[in-house]
Image (spheres, rainbow, N blue to C red):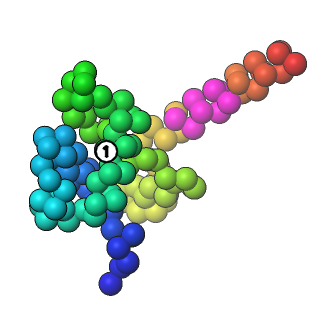
Amino acid sequence: MPNKQSINYDPGTRLQALALAEAGIPLPIIQAVTKLSRQSIYRLKRQARERGFDPAVSLQLKLEYVADRPRSGRPRAVAGVNGAGSEVEGGEAAVGAAVDEQAALETANEERE
Protein backbone atom coordinates (compact mmCIF):
# COMPACT_ATOMS: atom_id res chain seq x y z
CA MET A 1 0.00 0.00 0.00
CA PRO A 2 1.52 3.36 -1.01
CA ASN A 3 2.08 5.94 1.68
CA LYS A 4 -0.25 8.93 1.79
CA GLN A 5 2.35 11.34 0.36
CA SER A 6 2.80 9.36 -2.87
CA ILE A 7 -0.86 9.66 -3.92
CA ASN A 8 -1.16 11.94 -6.93
CA TYR A 9 -4.69 13.17 -7.51
CA ASP A 10 -5.72 13.99 -11.05
CA PRO A 11 -6.15 17.64 -12.09
CA GLY A 12 -9.94 17.24 -12.19
CA THR A 13 -10.07 16.31 -8.50
CA ARG A 14 -7.78 19.20 -7.60
CA LEU A 15 -9.89 21.60 -9.68
CA GLN A 16 -13.04 20.35 -7.95
CA ALA A 17 -11.47 20.87 -4.52
CA LEU A 18 -10.41 24.40 -5.45
CA ALA A 19 -13.90 25.24 -6.75
CA LEU A 20 -15.55 23.90 -3.60
CA ALA A 21 -13.12 25.80 -1.37
CA GLU A 22 -13.71 29.07 -3.25
CA ALA A 23 -17.47 28.52 -2.98
CA GLY A 24 -17.14 28.49 0.81
CA ILE A 25 -17.85 24.78 1.32
CA PRO A 26 -16.49 23.61 4.72
CA LEU A 27 -13.21 21.67 4.65
CA PRO A 28 -14.65 18.42 6.08
CA ILE A 29 -17.11 18.24 3.19
CA ILE A 30 -14.38 18.97 0.60
CA GLN A 31 -12.24 16.28 2.20
CA ALA A 32 -15.10 13.75 2.09
CA VAL A 33 -15.87 14.48 -1.57
CA THR A 34 -12.31 14.67 -2.94
CA LYS A 35 -10.35 12.54 -0.44
CA LEU A 36 -7.72 15.31 -0.27
CA SER A 37 -6.20 16.13 3.11
CA ARG A 38 -6.72 19.49 4.79
CA GLN A 39 -3.06 20.36 4.16
CA SER A 40 -3.39 19.44 0.45
CA ILE A 41 -6.39 21.72 0.06
CA TYR A 42 -4.57 24.66 1.64
CA ARG A 43 -1.49 23.97 -0.52
CA LEU A 44 -3.69 23.76 -3.61
CA LYS A 45 -5.27 27.15 -2.86
CA ARG A 46 -1.84 28.73 -2.28
CA GLN A 47 -0.36 27.27 -5.47
CA ALA A 48 -3.35 28.37 -7.54
CA ARG A 49 -2.88 31.94 -6.35
CA GLU A 50 0.86 31.76 -7.08
CA ARG A 51 -0.02 30.62 -10.62
CA GLY A 52 -2.33 33.55 -11.28
CA PHE A 53 -5.70 32.67 -9.78
CA ASP A 54 -7.30 35.74 -8.21
CA PRO A 55 -10.89 35.24 -7.03
CA ALA A 56 -11.28 39.02 -6.57
CA VAL A 57 -10.79 39.47 -10.33
CA SER A 58 -12.40 36.32 -11.75
CA LEU A 59 -13.75 33.06 -10.37
CA GLN A 60 -12.93 31.27 -13.63
CA LEU A 61 -10.74 28.26 -12.86
CA LYS A 62 -8.13 27.17 -15.37
CA LEU A 63 -6.33 23.86 -15.58
CA GLU A 64 -2.99 25.66 -15.38
CA TYR A 65 -3.82 26.62 -11.77
CA VAL A 66 -3.80 22.97 -10.66
CA ALA A 67 -1.71 21.18 -13.33
CA ASP A 68 1.31 19.10 -12.34
CA ARG A 69 4.64 20.83 -12.57
CA PRO A 70 7.20 19.48 -15.04
CA ARG A 71 9.33 16.74 -13.52
CA SER A 72 13.08 17.04 -13.30
CA GLY A 73 15.37 14.49 -14.84
CA ARG A 74 15.72 12.85 -18.19
CA PRO A 75 12.46 12.37 -20.12
CA ARG A 76 11.38 8.81 -20.83
CA ALA A 77 12.29 7.35 -24.21
CA VAL A 78 9.38 7.18 -26.65
CA ALA A 79 9.15 3.93 -28.59
CA GLY A 80 7.73 4.03 -32.11
CA VAL A 81 4.66 2.14 -33.25
CA ASN A 82 6.65 -0.76 -34.73
CA GLY A 83 9.02 -1.25 -31.84
CA ALA A 84 11.97 0.27 -30.09
CA GLY A 85 14.09 1.01 -33.16
CA SER A 86 11.65 3.16 -35.11
CA GLU A 87 11.86 6.95 -35.34
CA VAL A 88 9.37 9.28 -33.74
CA GLU A 89 7.79 11.54 -36.34
CA GLY A 90 9.26 15.03 -36.19
CA GLY A 91 11.89 13.95 -33.67
CA GLU A 92 14.91 14.91 -35.76
CA ALA A 93 13.45 18.32 -36.58
CA ALA A 94 12.82 19.03 -32.89
CA VAL A 95 16.36 18.02 -31.95
CA GLY A 96 17.78 20.14 -34.76
CA ALA A 97 15.77 23.17 -33.62
CA ALA A 98 16.97 22.71 -30.04
CA VAL A 99 20.60 22.48 -31.18
CA ASP A 100 20.19 25.62 -33.33
CA GLU A 101 18.63 27.49 -30.40
CA GLN A 102 21.44 26.42 -28.06
CA ALA A 103 24.07 27.55 -30.58
CA ALA A 104 22.36 30.94 -30.94
CA LEU A 105 22.32 31.38 -27.14
CA GLU A 106 26.01 30.51 -26.88
CA THR A 107 26.87 32.97 -29.65
CA ALA A 108 24.87 35.73 -27.95
CA ASN A 109 26.62 35.04 -24.65
CA GLU A 110 30.06 35.15 -26.29
CA GLU A 111 29.25 38.49 -27.94
CA ARG A 112 28.28 40.00 -24.58
CA GLU A 113 31.56 38.98 -22.96
Tag 1, which secondary structure? Answer: helix
Quick one: label 1, few (<14), some, or many (20+) residues within 10 Å?
many
Asked whether, in this view, residue 94 is left or right of residue 44, the answer is: right
Is residue 106 toward the left or the right of residue 102 in the image?
right
Left or right: 51 as drawn, with respect to 99:
left
109 over 88 or under it: above or below: above
Residue lying at 87% horizontally and 19% vertically, measured from the top left: 113
Q: Position of residue 59 (x, y in %)?
A: 19, 29
Residue found at x 35% / y 73%: 4
- The part of the image, by quadrant, that contains residue 52 is top left
Q: Position of residue 45 (x, y in %)?
A: 31, 44
The chief SS type of the magenta part is: helix
What residue range appears in magenta? Answer: 94-102
The location of residue 67, given as percent across then percent down, is 33, 45
Inspect this view and state whether residue 15 appears.
no
Q: Residue furthest top?
A: 111
- Residue type for callout 1: Lys
Image x and y of residue 68, in percent: 38, 49
If the image is split into quadrants, where does the N terminus sit? bottom left
Query: Which of 29/68 is in front?
Result: 29
In this view, 105 is above or below 81: above
The residue shown at (49%, 58%) is 76
As drawn, the residue found furthest toward the bottom would be 1
Is 96 colored magenta in this rendering? Answer: yes
Q: Is residue 106 above or below residue 25?
A: above
Residue 19 is left or right of residue 110, and the answer is left
User: For this rendering, which residue is in front, 101 or 11?
Assistant: 11
The residue depicted at 63 percent of the width and 26 percent of the height is 101
Q: Mark 1 — residue?
A: 45
